[in-house]
Amino acid sequence: MNEIFLLKLGEIVLKGANKKMFENKLRTNVARRMRPFGDFKVSILQSTVYVEPENELCDLDGAWEACHTIFGAISLCRCRPCEKSEDAIFEAVVNYLGDDLAAARSFKVESKRSDKRFPLNSIQISQAIGGRLAEAYPDVPVDVHHPDYTVYVEVRDFAAYVHGPAEPGAGGLPTGVGGRAAVLLSGGIDSPVAGYMIAKRGVELEAIHFFSYPYTSELAKDKVLELARKMARYCGRMTVDVVGFTEIQEAIRDNCPEEYFTIIMRRFMMRIAERIARDHGCECLVTGENLGQVASQTMQAMAVTHAVVDMPVFHPLIGMDKEEIVTIARRIDTLETSILPYEDCCTVFTPKHPKTKPKLSEAEKIEQKLDVEALIQRAIENTELVKIRYQG
Ligand code: ATP
Ligand code: MG
């Protein structure tokens, strides 16, 4: 076995009595995520997940890439295991990291020894290996303060491991430890990021999309499904409930004052989302709302919108700037899909002068002209369920 991965646990290490449960969840999640890439042994020891290929057929590069999207691990090391002796460690560094080391302007060795029976302590390991490397690579000076490249040596229970700089993991908590949430997923930039952020806290996701055919096209629906697919890389499989929203939007257009169109529409979305969420065993709703971004996202508008639901509504982007949201969207690879130019149902029948400070009593009065319950029932009956699988 030439290479293994060590995934370092993030916040889980701070957990008290529940730590085992969090670790077990992470271990089963990692094992499941490795499955498409061959036979891997996955175990947890000393706050580290060991991912070891069992044979030569494993797709190590694919597995390594997938590790970057597993919540619960904060940093990832791709390493060469070796025997626990000074000679073997030195050989492993030369063979495994030699090219990177030779190309560096300077280096240092950093060591950790969790097996206290090993005769050298961590400083002595660094000195011994660093000294031999300095001789073997005379053109690369040692610089312990600002090294261009760091060689890491870890002497653990069953073996020693050498690796270069760790890569950042996805962070957060293992999927499945935090319950289930339903994200209202439009085709925009914000809602996929909002869903991702809640999922990062260990929450399983379902998605709900409101679709106003023919005002919004099949392409708009495909775009949302593609976004869900991209989110599934991090969040795991999910179901997208595509709710037929056309009748409701037409009813609002025909019966409500224009300045209240968006608010009333959003109140319908929340009511329907709550019912679907409960059906799927979700305990909260998630939206991409962001304070002050548009007229329907003022404090007053959000209060009127959310007054119709009886479960927590989370909006993780509420205090972020657009630029910060875009940075995350780019990192999780949803941005390019989000900016494809298909209409969302929110942009159909948009009022010229939307009310930025709507009143709850006014919204309730306006809704008396509509058969709210019947409209909701028909929309829910007119829902298509699309299953999104995790794709490595
Ligand atoms: P996004 O970029 O997520 O579309 P937005 O800034 O365009 O957000 P709005 O259109 O006001 O904001 O929508 C606010 C939130 O309502 C969205 O983030 C999303 O959670 C939800 N939402 C809007 N339109 C839809 C839709 N067609 N289907 C499902 N949810 C929607
Ligand atoms: Mg939108």
Image (tube, helix red, strand yellow):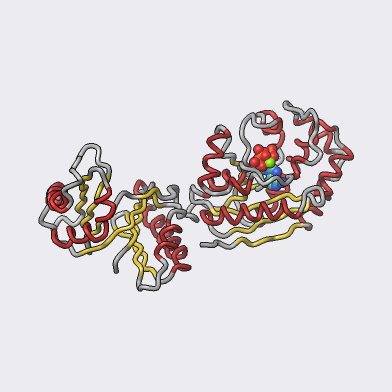
Total labels: the figure holds 0
Asked whether residue 383 appears in the rendered view, the answer is yes
Res. 250 image quadrant: top right
Image point (44%, 57%), residue name: 65
User: Along the line of sight, which residue is nearer the eye, 322 or 207?
Assistant: 322
Q: Is residue 136 left or right of residue 4?
A: left
Q: Is residue 214 left or right of residue 113?
A: right
Question: Percent from the top left, x then y, of residue 265?
Answer: 77, 40
Question: Percent from the top left, x then y, of residue 108?
Answer: 21, 45
User: Along the line of sight, which residue is nearer the eye, 84 or 247?
Assistant: 84
Image point (65%, 29%), residue name: 299
Task: Check the image and report above or below for 237 versus 35.
Answer: above
Figure quadrant, ligand 2: top right
Q: Is residue 159 left or right of residue 227?
A: left
Going by the picture, which residue comes out furthest to the top? Answer: 357
User: Along the line of sight, which residue is nearer the eye, 255 or 310?
Assistant: 255
Res. 361 image quadrant: top right
Image point (17%, 58%), residue name: 90
Asked whether residue 270 appears in the rendered view, the answer is no
Going by the picture, which residue comes out furthest to the front? Answer: 139
Question: Percent from the top left, x then y, of residue 171?
Answer: 43, 48
